[in-house]
Amino acid sequence: METRVENIESPEYAKIIVLRLVTDKGNSIRVDVPLRLLDEAGIRIEKDDLINIEIKRELVDMDSWDIVYSCKAYMEREGRTLISCGGLQVSLDSSLIDTRPGERVYIYIKKV
C-alpha cells in the first residue's frame, strides 16, 4: 500500500528514525528504521515522501524492496496491532492487517 511520510522523529536514545506514515484512507503506521539500514539501502527519507509498505505472511521477492523485516505480532490494543521486528517496533491500525499475536509477518518497505 502506498503511504505518505507524515512525520519523522529521531530519538536521542537510539540510532533510528521513527517514521509516521499515513495511507490515503487516513490509516496510520509507525515504523522504527535504523539509520544504518537506510545507509545500506542508499535511501534518504524525508517528510511527505511516498513509501510503499506491504505486510505479508511469507518471505517473497526481497530484491524489489529497500528494506524487509522479519517480525512477530505481539499485541492488539485500542484498535492497533503491535509488531516486533527484532526489537524494532511497528504499530498500525488493526484494519490494515489480519494477524494474531504470536504470528510471524514480513514487512516490506520501499521508497517510491
Image (tube, rainbow, N blue to C red):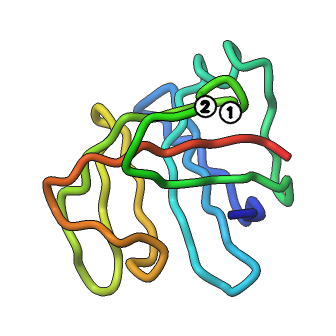
Q: Residue at x 75, y 52 (%)?
A: 51
Q: Residue at x 40, y 42 (%)?
A: 58
Q: Is residue 58 above or below residue 34?
A: below
Q: Are marks 1 and 2 in contact (CB under 8 Å)?
A: yes
Q: Position of residue 1 (x, y in %)?
A: 68, 64
Q: Position of residue 83 (x, y in %)?
A: 31, 54
37 vs 104, nearest the viewer: 104
Q: Is 40 left, or right, of 98 in this rendering?
A: right
Q: Is residue 7 above or below residue 93?
A: above
Q: Quadrant of residue 39?
A: top right
Q: CA distance from mark 1 to mark 2?
A: 8 Å
Q: Is residue 95 above or below residue 81?
A: below
Amino acid type assigned to the residue bearing label 2 in the image: Asp
Task: Tell me the residue that label 1 is attached to.
Answer: 65
Q: Residue at x 66, y 85 (%)?
A: 26
Amino acid type assigned to the residue bearing label 1 in the image: Trp
Q: Is 73 left, or right, of 50 in this rendering?
A: left
Q: Quadrant of residue 59?
A: top left
Task: Tell me the residue that label 2 is attached to.
Answer: 61
As drawn, which residue projects farthest toward the left? Answer: 102
Q: Position of residue 43 (x, y in %)?
A: 79, 27
SS under mark 1: loop
